[in-house]
C-alpha cells in the first residue's frame, strides 16, 4: 500500500520527518509530493524545487521508509489538481492531509484521506522557521541536520532576509 | 440582434433569470458567457464550468429566449479579453454589463454596452447565496427550482462548507 | 442518461447530424464537445469555436434532442484530457467515439465507450468538404442548410481558399 | 558596456528620464525592459505594452543615449526570470535596480547590480501620477511632454478613472 | 502614418534592409515585429529574440527610418494573433506582408495589407543564408556588415552547425 | 560530484541501467531527469511521468548509485531549458549526453558535457522496444525484470497497441 503526502517543505523540518515516520508505519511506501514546485524566491516559498529535493532527500536517507520524491507544480484549475498529481506520481492508495481543501478534492476523486498526526505544530511549522530565519533567531534545532547544512550551502537565510526586505 | 451577458453564475439565481428575461425582450438571441470557467472549489467559485452549464441550462429551459451558453476561461491579458470572447462566442451586437471594467474593455473595442436592469440586488446576489449556504441559512428561495435540485445533486453545500472551513 | 460526442465540426455536416440523431435515440441528452476549440484559420481547422457554435447550434435546432454544446480547447497532457472534459461538461455516462486514442483514454478513466454509427463516411467527412470548398466543388449538399448559410455569412470559403494558398 | 533597467513605466515620468540620463553616463548603451508587459487596464497597470513602447520611445528620442526598448512579460517562476530577460534582451553587463528582490535574483545569476540614483522620489513616482490622474489633479508636469501628449491620444486618464471606479 | 512589418529575421539580411527602406518611403514610422520570439536553437530559428534585437538594431541604425523593434512571441490561437500584436506594438495603420495567412488575419481585423517589394528573393532569404552557414558557404555578403559581426560574436554559425548535426 | 542524465525512459531498459552504472563510477550521485514528463498515451511516449517514476525507481533499487529521480516537463523556449532543469534538480556538475542539441544548450550555459557510453544501441533502444511491444515480439529480455512487471501492471502493451492502431 502506498500513501501520498503533499507539502511545500519550505523548509523540510522535524515535524515533517516525524510525520513521514508515522505514515511509513501504516503503509509500505510513501509518495512525497513537493508542492508549489515552480515557486521560489518569495517569503512564503524561498527555495526552488531543486533545492527542496536536495533538502528533503538528504533528510529522508536517515529514515527506513521507501519514498518517492516528486515535484508538483501548481495548476490553475483546482478541479484538475488530483489528476495532475496522479499523472506525475506512482499510483497511491491513501492520502494524508489535514487541509480541508485537499481533503475535499481527493474525496471527490474517491480517495481515502487520513488526518496527519501533528507533532508540536507551533514549533515545527514552516512559517515559524522562516520567521526565525528572517529575524536571526535560532531555527536550526527545528530541522534535521542535513537540512540545516543544505540551507547554509544555498545561502538560504541571506536570500530570505533579502527578499523579506523587499516586502517592506 | 444578439446580446452578450457574462456572469460567473456561482450559482445561477433568480436575479440572473430576471435579467435574461429583460435582455431577451430587447434582442433576438442571448449569448451567455460563463466566466472564470476554469475556477472551482473556492469560496468565490465553488462550482466547475460543467456544473454551472448544467445549472444554467436547466434554468434556461423555463424561458422562451434563444440562448447560447459558452464557458469562458479567464486569461491573464486584459487587453485580449474581448477578442478571447469573440473567438469563443457567436457574433454579438450589444453587451449587457454594469461592471465599469467590462464596459471599458468592450467600449474600447467598439461595442455598445448597456446597463443591466437589477432586481433586488442585495438578495439576488451570488455572494449572499454562498454566504447562506455556508451558514446553513435558507438559500433555495433565491434560485430557480432546477438550480436548487442541481446543487443538491452535486453536494454543493457540503463542498462549499468544507472549503470555507479551509479559509479559516 | 447522458452521452458525450466530441468532434471538431470543421464544418458540421449531415454525417454529424445523422450521428446525433442516432445517439439521441439511445440516451436522454447529448453533450456535444467542440474539440480543438482554440484552433482556427488553418486548413484543418478553418473556423473559430464561436463560428462553430453558431453553425452547430443552428443545425441542432432542427433536431428533437436535448443537447449541450461545449467548446473544448486542446490541452498538451493527454493523461489529463478526460478530466479536462469532465470539468467543462455536465456529467455524462457514456462516450461515443470510433477513435482508438479517445476510446483508450475514456476506458482507462472507467467510461463505457460505444462505436458511432457512420453514414456514408467518404462523403460526409470534414476533410472532403474542406477539399471541395478549396477546389470550388459542390459542398453545400453535404451540410445542413443552416450550416451552408452560416459558412456564407462568415465568408468561410474565401478564408479557406486564402489559407490554403498559403500552404503551397 | 551595456546596462539594464527594468520598469513598468505606468507611465514613463521625469524620474525615469533622469535615471536613464544618469545610467547613460556610466554605460555605452541602455537596455530598457518594459516590465509586466502583458498587464493593462488595471489601476496599477493602466497601459498596454504597445502604449508604453509608444510613450517611452517618444520620450527617449529627446535623449542622446543609445537605447533598446524591450517588452518583458511576467513569468510565474521567479527562478527563471533572469534567464527570461536574457533571452529577450541584447546581452548586458550591469543591472540598475533598487529593488531587493530584483537585486537578489540578478546577483544569484552573477550580475553586478547597482543602486539607481533617485530624483525627488515622492513626486516622480508612478503611483502618485496615477493617483493624480484619477483624482483629476495636475500630473502633466511630472512627465515629459511627449508622454503627456501620448496619454491624451490614448484617452488614458478616462480609462484609468473608469477602471478605478470599478475598484470601488 | 505607421506601417507594420513582421519577420523572424533568422538572420536579418539585405533583403530585409531593402524592404524596410522601401516601406520607410511610404510611411512615417515602421514597427518591426520580431516574430517567433520564443523560438531559438533550432535549424529554422537559431537565434534568440535578444540576439535578433541586437542584430536588427545594429543594422537599422544605418537607415534613416524611425523604427520600433518589438519581439512577438507565438501564440496558439490564430484568431487572437492580431490582437496579440496590437497590444504589444504602437498603433499602426497598414501592414506589409506577402503571406496569405497573415494577410487574411489582418484583413479580417480591418487592416489595409500591402504586398512587400521583394529584392532577389532567392538569394536574400533566411533559409538560404542558414543553409550556407551550415554548409560552410559564403553567407556574409547577404547580410549587412553589423549583422555578420554580431553573428560572429554569438558564435552563431557553430551553433547552427551543431544543431543541424542533431537534425540528422 | 553530481552528474545529470536526461532521458524519456519510454520505457527504462537495460541500456539505461548500464549507462547509469557507468556514470555512477565517475560521479558521486546521479540526477536522472525524466524528460517530456507531460507526454503520455502516444506511440513515442506511451507512459505517464508517474508510471515512469515507478518503472525507473524499481529498477534503480538494484543499483548501488545514489540517485535523484526528477520529472522534467517540456517547455517551449529552448533558450530557457537549462535553467528550467536547474530549478527542478539538485545542483549538478557535469551532464551526460550524446545529443548535439542537448550538448550545445548545456555548453552555452557553461557545463561540461560528456558523451555517454552506449551498450548495443540497436537492441537497447526505446523505439525498438516499443516496436516489439506493438508487433507482439519479445521485448522483456531488453528491460530489467521490475520494469517488465510494472509495464504489465499498467497494461502498457495493450495501451501502446491501441494507440498505434489510432496512428494508422
Image: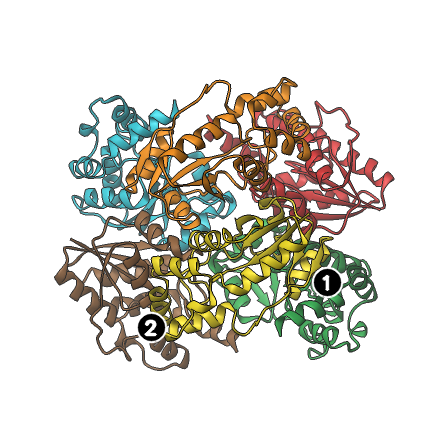
Chain colours: A yellow, B green, C red, D brown, E cyan, F orange
Please give the label number shown on residue D1. Answer: none
Q: In the rendered view, does A122 fall on the left or right side of E14? A: right
Subunit of mark 1? B
Q: In the rendered view, does D85 fall on the left or right side of C88? A: left
How many numbered tags mark residues here? 2
- Viewer-nearest of labels 2 and 1? 2
Residue D137 lies, with reference to residue B111, above or below; the image says below
In the foreground, A2 or F88: A2
Query: Which quadrant of the figure has residue C142?
Result: top right
Q: Which residue is mark 1?
A: B24
Residue F136 spot, x, y in % from top left: 66, 19
**Residue density around tag 1, few if under 14, some if 14–19, many if 20 or more, within 10 Å:** some
Residue C102 spot, x, y in % from top left: 68, 35
Q: In the rendered view, does B153 fall on the left or right side of D142? A: right
Residue E55 spot, x, y in % from top left: 23, 42
Q: Is residue A141 visible?
A: yes
Subunit of mark 2? D
- The reply to whether discs 2 and 1 touch (Cβ–Cβ < 8 Å) is no
Query: Which quadrant of the figure has residue D127?
Result: bottom left
Disc 2 secondary structure class: helix
Q: CA distance from mark 2 to mark 1?
A: 44 Å
Please give the label number shown on residue D126. Answer: 2
Disc 1 secondary structure class: helix
In the foreground, D113 or B97: D113
User: Is disc 1 on the same chain as disc 2?
Assistant: no
Rendered residue at 51%/45% (across/down): E77
Rendered residue at 38%/33% (across/down): F25
Residue F42 lies, with reference to residue D41, above or below; the image says above
Amino acid at each position: 500500500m502506498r500513501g501520498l503526502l503533499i507539502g511545500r517543505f519550505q523548509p523540510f523540518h522535524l515535524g515533517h520527518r516525524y510525520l513521514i515516520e508515522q505514515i511509513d508505519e501504516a503503509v509500505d511506501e510513501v509518495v512525497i509530493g513537493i508542492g508549489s514546485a515552480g515557486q521560489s524566491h518569495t517569503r512564503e516559498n524561498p527555495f526552488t524545487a531543486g533545492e527542496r529535493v536536495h533538502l528533503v532527500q538528504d533528510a529522508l536517507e536517515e529514515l527506513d521508509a521507501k519514498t518517492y520524491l516528486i515535484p508538483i507544480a501548481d495548476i490553475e484549475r483546482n478541479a484538475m489538481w488530483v489528476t495532475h498529481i496522479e499523472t506525475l506520481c506512482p499510483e497511491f492508495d491513501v492520502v494524508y492531509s489535514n487541509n480541508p481543501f485537499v481533503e475535499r478534492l481527493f474525496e471527490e476523486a474517491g480517495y481515502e484521506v487520513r488526518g496527519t498526526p501533528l507533532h508540536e505544530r507551533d514549533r515545527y511549522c514552516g512559517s515559524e522557521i522562516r520567521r526565525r530565519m528572517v529575524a536571526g533567531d535560532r531555527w536550526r534545532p527545528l530541522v534535521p541536520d542535513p537540512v540545516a547544512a543544505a540551507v547554509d550551502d544555498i545561502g538560504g537565510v541571506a536570500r530570505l532576509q533579502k527578499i523579506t526586505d523587499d516586502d517592506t
